[in-house]
Image (cartoon, grey):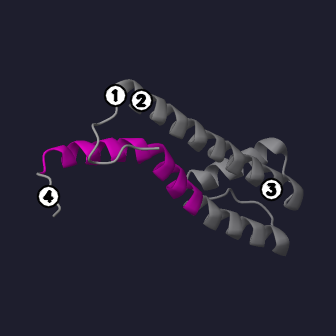
Amino acid sequence: MYEHHSEPIAPRAVFLRRLATSTSIGLLALLGSLAAGMIGFHVLENLSWIDAFLNSAMLLGGMGPLDHDRDTAAKLFEGLYALYCGLAVISIAGVVLAPVAHRFLHKLHEGTPRKRRG
């Protein structure tokens, strides 16, 4: 998907297309995570859809859920979803920023002399 460090850096149009693709993948993953949380909060905790959205968004944003009554199954879901959200946000950020990091490292590597094999 990316050019090797020995190849010339990709043109700006290719970089922007990669960035758009990775951002789209990240947004889809974020929406999927939000939907999964909403369904879990709605089914297990009997929250309205808007409250389920709010709790899911708060967990994905790193803020934590709002206070409400929970039974054991709901507490387990909420804890596991919170752990998932922490990993999901880091993973999604990695996917979205991968083209930027690659381009930065590629430009940084341009100035280093090449070792000869032999």
Residue 41 badge: 3
Q: Report helix, strand or loop for mark 4.
A: loop
Counting residues from the N terminus, which is met first, the one under dot 4 or under dot 3? Answer: 3
Q: Position of residue 118 (x, y in %)?
A: 15, 64
Q: Report helix, strand or loop for mark 1.
A: loop
Counting residues from the N terminus, which is met first, the one under dot 4 or under dot 2? Answer: 2
Magenta stretch: residue 111 in it? yes
Residue at 61%, 59% in the rendered image: 85
The Cα atoms of the two marked residues, 4 and 2, are separated by 29 Å
Counting residues from the N terminus, which is met first, the one under dot 4 or under dot 1? Answer: 1
Q: Report helix, strand or loop for mark 3.
A: helix
Q: Position of residue 117 (x, y in %)?
A: 17, 61
Q: Are marks 3 and 1 in contact (CB under 8 Å)?
A: no
> Which residue position is annotated with label 2?
14
- In the image, 3 versus 62, the foreground residue is 3
> Which residue position is annotated with label 1?
11
> Which residue position is annotated with label 4?
116
Q: Amino acid at mark 4?
A: Arg
Magenta segment boundaries in residue numbering: 87-112
Q: Amino acid at mark 3?
A: Phe
Residue 74 badge: none
* Res 19 visible: yes
Whether 78 is drawn above or below 24: the answer is below
